[in-house]
Amino acid sequence: MSSLAALSVDDHAEIVQLVGDYGYHHDERDFGRLGELFTDDARYTMVIAGGDTIGPRQGRDAIVAQISEFKSRQSDIRRHVITNVSVTSINADVASVRCYVSVLATTPERTEVVTAGVYHDRVVRQGGRWLIAEKLLRLDRSF
């Protein structure tokens, strides 16, 4: 169950929007806007079940560069479907977020789920807005 004790309803809505914006800007390859969602010193680690651990990547630029590199190898259209968002307040300026992700890939022939997993994020309030300070992605299989 989520705890909203130290977060306002607006904070909760902004955090859920942050999670959605991450998926959207990732899929649209809008790397400038994607980078704006992270703190300068953010960390990102991806753990693939039965496979590699990628990262941690440290810093906004390194994270965006890694995502850009992955995207450069994809010729299909990818969509991050993010669901089951759970926000837990740590204090008034820090929260943890857990959500599922399913990644769809569309080619001219079909649309299919290529992987699924769970994001575990730590988000912080900086400069009056919520940003991703740490993102851990545990994938059920490679993408």
Image (tube, rainbow, N blue to C red):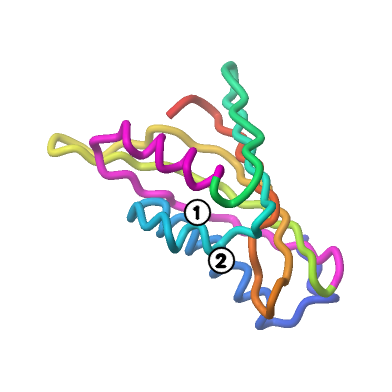
Residue 16 image offset from top left, x and y in percent: 59, 67
**Which quadrant would residue 24 be assigned to in this image?**
bottom left
* Residue at the spot 67% in from the left edge and 74% down from the top edge: 12
Give the magenta part as a residue range: 62-91
Q: CA distance from mark 2 to mark 1?
A: 11 Å
The relative height of residue 102 versus residue 93 in the rendered view (above or below) is: above
Amino acid marked by disc 2? Leu
* Residue contact between numbered discs 2 and 1, judged by CB atoms under 8 Å: no
**Which quadrant would residue 39 be assigned to in this image?**
bottom right
Tell me the crowding category of disc 1: few under 14, some 14 to 19, or many 20 or more residues within 10 angstroms, Cα based. many
Q: Which residue is mark 1?
A: 82
Residue 14 image offset from top left, x and y in percent: 60, 75
SS under mark 2: helix
* Residue at the spot 49% in from the left edge and 47% down from the top edge: 64
Amino acid marked by disc 1? Ile
Identify the image quadrant of the C terminus.
top left
SS under mark 1: strand
Left or right? Give the position of 9 relative to 142. right
Q: Which residue is mark 2?
A: 18
* Residue at the spot 54% in from the left edge and 49% down from the top edge: 61
61 and 6: which is toward the camera:
61
* Residue at the spot 56% in from the left edge and 43% down from the top edge: 62
Q: Residue furthest top?
A: 50
- The magenta stretch spans residue 52: no
